[in-house]
DNA sequence: AGAAAACTCAACCGAAAAGTTAAATATGCG
DNA sequence: CGCATATTTAACTTTTCGGTTGAGTTTTCT
């Protein structure tokens, strides 16, 4: 399965063997958690991944269990170097 | 609440408003997931955080949503520089 | 206008998760 | 030994989760 930039709820549901309503619910939860964003244009609701939400979790995990707090500047440089 | 290096099951349970048995079960699950380690000395079972278990999740999150896969060598260098 | 498409809502269901209490198992101590 | 401490086990109850179905809303298409 390929993750498109923007997918309708129906598109996301297509490969799964569950009802559309189930996927709709699930996506609403993801949206309320900030992991995806949803924008309704016409009758279709477009869903987009929001990787930043995971990034902050990742940063938190980096800091977890360390005595010295993570240097966020260094971390951001790392991210920038990875993303470009 | 302060996270000590080593905590007995009772210590972990103290601030929570749930039974000791519940915490004991929960800690067993964390241990089986590798998120903590438990060592029994005498009648007390000492629990210690294992941040490495979170690291692989963190790495996965870094890669999530990026077009270019994460360069793990660079990521490891980042981690080493943070940890020393 | 009327039908189809895209989604959501509400009510419901079963299974898994997470909690409780009481008893059991070790270990440490005076 | 006998009692207190630390934790686990067992049986059970409650809550949450993830799903279903069918009806309802809004938008698009002809």
Image: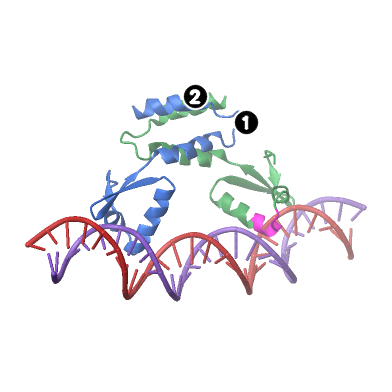
Chain colours: A green, B blue, C red, D purple
Q: Indicate which disc residue B67 carries.
A: 1
Viewer-proximal residue, B62 or B25?
B25
Where in the figure is residue B71, as x and y percent of width and height? 53, 26
Residue B48 appears in the picture as rendered: yes
In this view, the residue in front, B57 or A12, is B57
Q: Could you tell me residue B77's position as x and y percent? A: 44, 24
Does the magenta-highlighted stretch encompass residue A19? yes
Label 2 Cα crowd, 10 Å radius (few <14 / some 14-19 / many 20+): few
Element carrying mark 1: loop
Q: Chain of mark 2?
A: B
**Label 1 – label 2 distance at C-alpha:** 17 Å
The residue at which mark 2 appears reads as B73
Where, by quadrant of the figure, is residue D21 drawn? bottom right
* Residue B17 is a magenta residue: no
Left or right: A37 in relation to D30: left
**Which one is nearer the viewer's eye here, C9 or B69?**
B69
Residue at x-position 55% and y-position 29%: B70
Q: Earlier in the sequence, mark 1 or mark 2?
A: 1
Q: Chain of mark 1?
A: B
Does C3 appear above or below A54?
A: below
- Total marks placed: 2
Magenta highlight range: A17-24
Give SS at disc 2: helix
Q: Classify 10 Å Cα crowding around label 1: few (below 14), some (14-19), many (20 and above).
A: few
Residue B63 image position (x, y, % from top left): 55, 34
């Amino acid at each position: 399965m390929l993750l498109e930039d923007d997918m309708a709820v129906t598109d996301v549901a297509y490969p799964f063997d569950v009802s559309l309503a189930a996927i709709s619910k699930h996506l609403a939860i993801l949206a309320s958690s900030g992991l995806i964003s949803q924008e309704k244009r016409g009758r279709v609701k477009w869903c987009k991944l929001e990787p930043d939400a995971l990034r902050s979790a990742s940063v938190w995990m980096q800091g977890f269990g360390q005595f010295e707090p993570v240097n966020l500047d260094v971390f951001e440089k790392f991210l920038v170097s990875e993303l470009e």
